[in-house]
Amino acid sequence: EKTRSSFSTKLNDLVARYRKIDEEFFEDLEEVLIQADVGVMTVMDLIEELEMEAKRQNIKDAADLREVISEKLVEIYADEDNTAEAPVNMQSDGLTVFLFVGVNGVGKTTTIGKMAHQLKQQGKKVLLVAGDTFRAGAIEQLAVWGERAEVDVIKHNAGSDPAAVIYDGIQAAKSRGVDVLLCDTAGRLQNKVNLMNELSKVKRVIEREIPGAPHEVLLVLDATTGQNALSQAKTFSQATDVSGIVLTKLDGTAKGGIVLAIRKELKIPVKYVGLGEQMNDLEKFDPHAFVYGLFSDMLEKE
Amino acid sequence: MAFEGLAERLQNTIKKMTGKGKVSEQDVKEMAREVRLALLEADVNFKVVKDFIKKIKERAVGQEVMNSLTPGQQIIKIVKEELTDLMGGEQSKIAVSERPPTVIMMVGLQGAGKTTTTGKLANLLRKKHNRKPLLVAADVYRPAAINQLETIGKQLNLPVFSKGTDANPVDIANDAIAHAKEEHYDYVLIDTAGRLHTDENLMTELREIKENVDPAEILLVVDSMTGQDAVNVAESFDEQLAVSGVILTKLDNDNRGGAALSIRAVTQKPIKYAGMGEKLDELEVFHPERMASRILGMGDVLSLIEKA
Ligand SMILES: Nc1nc2c(ncn2[C@@H]2O[C@H](COP(=O)(O)OP(=O)(O)OP(=O)(O)O)[C@@H](O)[C@H]2O)c(=O)[nH]1
Ligand SMILES: Nc1nc2c(ncn2[C@@H]2O[C@H](COP(=O)(O)OP(=O)(O)OP(=O)(O)O)[C@@H](O)[C@H]2O)c(=O)[nH]1
Ligand SMILES: [Mg+2]
Ligand SMILES: [Mg+2]
């Protein structure tokens, strides 16, 4: 509640900076959202709705449009009363399995390292499994993260079958009484049918070995990605039934606004954000801070 | 829906316009709107789009369109011409220093594809240009980055120069050049760590490497899926380092790759190569006119023009 009201206050401040609701105001708003990589159609729809509302209520003064704008903006990331952060499906007892998927270079392996550290700090017993057997140095990279977070890593040789190493990871997790198993996979572009089938197979192995697992399929998205992220979300969902998004590299200048379009079209929530390359640079997603961040440039411009 | 090409977008407007003989201002406006949306959906930067649309509009109200029997097609032709022009007419080549070795620095954001592309480029230089390249592992930050480059070197049967993760990247680069001179390598490809353009310390490190090794090329590696931020990144890297060219990666995706246009427009630097896959032989010379077609789904557009 508290974050919500402070969010509205900030938005109100923002809108207050514009005295008149004219074409220029809407143009500015449109540019800000486009620049943040919010889906083009999502932006156009939103602007159209706002313009109609302004006309309908005969609003001329920016201040009078505040309410409407904050309402609409909140609506683009949350449905009805669902403004709370999306919870992560962690089993209270027994093994929890997370599967990480995504295109090349987005930050899957790094996110696993960060999450391993975080869970370990919370007193959980964590195990990693090196399901990327393809990319040069991928297994070694995960092994370094295992050392940093002080958790074990199950690995096979480079070039071996990813489903087989995931299977071994599950068996090891079971026999060692692990709380959370984090499964890395190789990056793959969503238009590579064979590679997407391979990923579905990995998921089926997990499903078969542990009823109810994987408890989260996390699609890792790079915040610098533009409209293509929507197609990534669609195709990875078809192949692996994605349950949440990790939005990485938000420490850069990109805003990652495309997750709004993803949320709107596919109903997939963002669960975590990556804010750097170090162990502690992973945080729970805060929708209010995020939406507000989309407009920070508009604020600074004034 | 998401990647509807320009052709589909323009179809209705064109239908209305053909046979009418004359184009109204309203027609041009509608056209411009469709072109704008198509470019934005292709991730072309909004400022670049703005300038571009202005140019198109100017030409569209001119004689060539007004007097044409097929004004719709005429406008598409203009779009294609302007776009190809913006992308930079001809392909450009990789530099060769008069005195070997030719030094190339690979720079860019995290995960863009620098390390992989370093391997690919070395492979290309050896295969196509008959050169003897040395790979240099100057990323001491990312876990297993050196191991990654060494593995790539092994796969290609090419030597990799490294000094472990405790060495300073500037020293690594300097020593690598000395080594290359001794061993008569004619190309030195330096793989640097991914970094944000806003990271002052790490950008300073790149400038220091540059001052020390005097590279013939500084190639900015950019992920073709990058959205609006591509402009900030390219502009900033160029300001701080004066890059000599760009390599666009992951173009084996089905995205439109509007980032190419944005980067080209703001930096004027040539895009030299395109990464077309994860394998080490999947690097191609960049073709500006193909990219122009791709950004707007022009394959379809061209067939529309022919039908006219
Ligand atoms: N600035 C920043 N860099 C990040 C973040 N997350 C990951 N990275 C960097 O992005 C690069 C790629 O990260 P990886 O974890 O290797 O990505 P991946 O998805 O596993 O890559 P592949 O396995 O090759 O597909 C590395 O240099 C990471 O340090 C983040 O939140 N912020
Ligand atoms: N499909 C495809 N994948 C690519 C291409 N180029 C690179 N990759 C993949 O992208 C991911 C990142 O590549 P890297 O070479 O590690 O990127 P980098 O820029 O060196 O990353 P950092 O050193 O962490 O900044 C890897 O999974 C590569 O296999 C390409 O052209 N197509
Ligand atoms: Mg990885
Ligand atoms: Mg690298």
Image (cartoon, grey):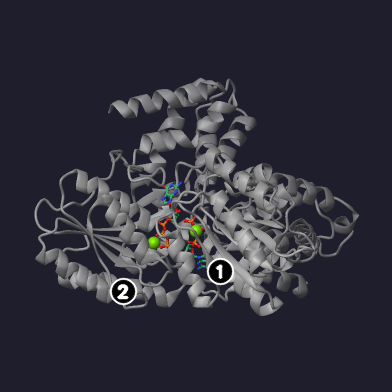
- Name the residue nearer the viewer: A185 or B209: B209
- Residue A274 located left or right of residue A302: left
What is the three-letter code of the residue carrying label 1? Gly
Which label sits on residue A300?
none
Residue B32 visible here? yes
Q: Quadrant of residue A236?
A: bottom left
Say which residue appears at 68% left-offset and 51% top-offset.
B243
Say which residue appears at 53% left-offset and 45% top-offset.
B196
What is the three-letter code of the residue carrying label 2? Pro
x, y percentage for residue B35?
Answer: 68, 54
- Name the residue nearer the viewer: A54 or A69: A69
Circles 2 and 1 in contact, beta carbons < 8 Å: no
Q: Quadrant of residue B197?
A: top right
Dot 1 surroundings within 10 Å: few (below 14), some, or many (20 or more)? many
Q: Is residue B267 above or below residue A203?
A: above
Q: Chain of mark 2?
A: A
Dot 2 surroundings within 10 Å: few (below 14), some, or many (20 or more)? many
Say which residue appears at 55% left-offset and 35% top-offset.
A51
Distance of mark 2 from mark 1, alpha carbons? 24 Å
As helix, strand or loop, the secondary structure at mark 2 comes to helix
Which label sits on residue A162?
2
Q: Chain of mark 1?
A: B
Which label sits on residue B119?
1
x, y percentage for residue A176?
Answer: 11, 63
